[in-house]
Image (spheres, rainbow, N blue to C red):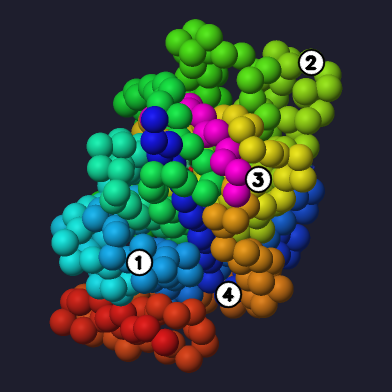
Amino acid sequence: MTVIGIDKMSFFSPQQYIDMVELANARGEEPDKYLIGIGQTQQAVIPPTQDVVTMAANAADEMLTASDRKAITMILFATESGIDNSKSGAVYLQRLLGINPYARTIEMKQACYAGTFALMQARDYVTLHPTEKVLVVASDIARYGLHTSGEVTQGGGAVAMLVSADPAIAEINQDNQYLSRDVMDFWRPIYADTARVDGKFSANIYQDFFKAVWTRYKQKSGRSIKDFKALAFHLPFTKMGLKALRDVLPEASEEQQAALMAEFEASRVYSKRIGNLYTGSLYLSLYSLLANSTTLKLGDRVGMFSYGSGAEGEFYSLTLRPHFRGGLVSGQLEELFASRQQVTIPEYEAIFNNQLSGAADRELDTQHDDAKFVLSGLENEQRQYICH
Ligand code: HMG
């Protein structure tokens, strides 16, 4: 049978960040609360010249060849920080990336969960049409507001994934278990540009959903923790994944517990320095695991836990393919970390308050943003995108 899964993965986050010790000092908190209690060391800062469309374009562009662009027949754009209430981010992406015009383009939303739903739609579509490829992007900016308790869990970026037959990275198994329940743990009313959240409640719901879908997965699949070489989690902040992992560790032998912990550390290297990117967070965790694990090999099963507030949880597994590291854009995150610039807390606050909003025409200063795709302003209420 043809294997269907993730063939390529690429990531983008902007060129500026803040240090969590500086944020803790500015907010009168113990630095260890942020570094250990939350599990974050740095946070991506999103300039006004980047939005979910430019970030998705910057991520996808780095992995797509000319022949991929011709073969893509569907673009699935997962986001909860979209730029329009009507038009999808995917159709902008099609133009910016020069993708086949005879492609379907659509945007999807269910908090942080939509990236997983998009990936499953892509898998099912390619299963029926194995000569075609689907581009999945998960792009978001996590905004809670200055001086809020959620501020330490902000961040942003985009993960792009190409789904195809005979993929390089991983087979997406048909073993998903999911659960939805109407819960008010986190939401963003249509008029607001920052999230509303019941923080501790949201963390409890995340753990409840993980335990529920994991239990159901074991019952339905007959598998146990022994069948997994690693687990990757949605990481709104990296301590959250650790809490979920600790819920299942008692099911493993001592030796496997140590191995699962080591893989978890590999999976949170990047998120610690980027922060939450909502729909893309689970996939940044997977990217980090694949790039930083020294023990994973062909055929290993990786468990994936996706969570989106509101709320929806899903557990499924991937099986690693022979060239799983070859499907990642080589050295991408290391280059970003080596070149991005630290900004002070007052500079970050000014950037936070200077996003494109409202209906008035505005030209943005794009000189300081050397990403390939940037937002240059608003004209007649239309976002203007340019390619450097
Ligand atoms: P808080 O109230 O500022 O923090 O909010 P806290 O008092 O709960 O402390 C956090 C942790 O630091 C605690 O550890 C403290 O003990 C520890 P825990 O008990 O949780 O293990 N701590 C220390 N550790 C070491 N040294 C110290 C120290 N001091 C304290 N000196 C909260 C934290 C995460 C609630 C807040 O930042 C928040 O509301 N964030 C946003 C919501 C969120 O991320 N929720 C996660 C689950 S929901 C989800 O994942 C979906 C989401 O991605 C959205 C979507 O789906 O679209 C958010």
Residue 94 x/y as whole percent = 26, 67
Query: Quick check: is 143 in the magenta stretch?
Result: no
Disc 4 from disc 2: Cα separation: 42 Å
Q: Does any atom of ligand 1 lie closer than 8 Å to the CB of label 3?
A: no
Disc 2 from disc 3: Cα separation: 21 Å
Give amino acid for label 4. Gln
Which of the two labelled residues, at mark 3 and mark 4, occupies the earlier sequence position? 4
Instruction: Establish if 376 lies above or below 345.
Output: below
Residue 138 x/y as whole percent = 41, 53
Please report the bounds of the magenta region as a residue range.
312-323
Which of the two labelled residues, at mark 1 and mark 3, occupies the earlier sequence position? 1
Which of the two labelled residues, at mark 1 and mark 4, occupies the earlier sequence position? 4
Say whether residue 77 is visible.
no
Give amino acid for label 3. Leu
Neighbours of disc 4 within 10 Å: few (<14), some (14-19), many (20+): some
To which residue does mark 3 refer?
289
To which residue does mark 4 refer?
15
Give amino acid for label 2. Ser
Disc 3 from disc 4: Cα separation: 22 Å
Give amino acid for label 1. Ser
Q: Residue at x 25, y 37 (%)?
A: 128
| Quadrant assignment for the N terminus | top left
Camera-side mark, 3 or 4: 3
> Circle 4 sits in a helix, a strand or a loop, which is it?
loop
To which residue does mark 1 refer?
67
Which of the two labelled residues, at mark 2 and mark 1, occupies the earlier sequence position? 1
Residue contact at pointers 3 and 4, CB within 8 angstroms: no
Instruction: Establish if 238 lies above or below 147.
Output: above
Disc 1 from disc 3: Cα separation: 28 Å
Question: In the shown orientation, is residue 54 left or right of residue 85?
Answer: right
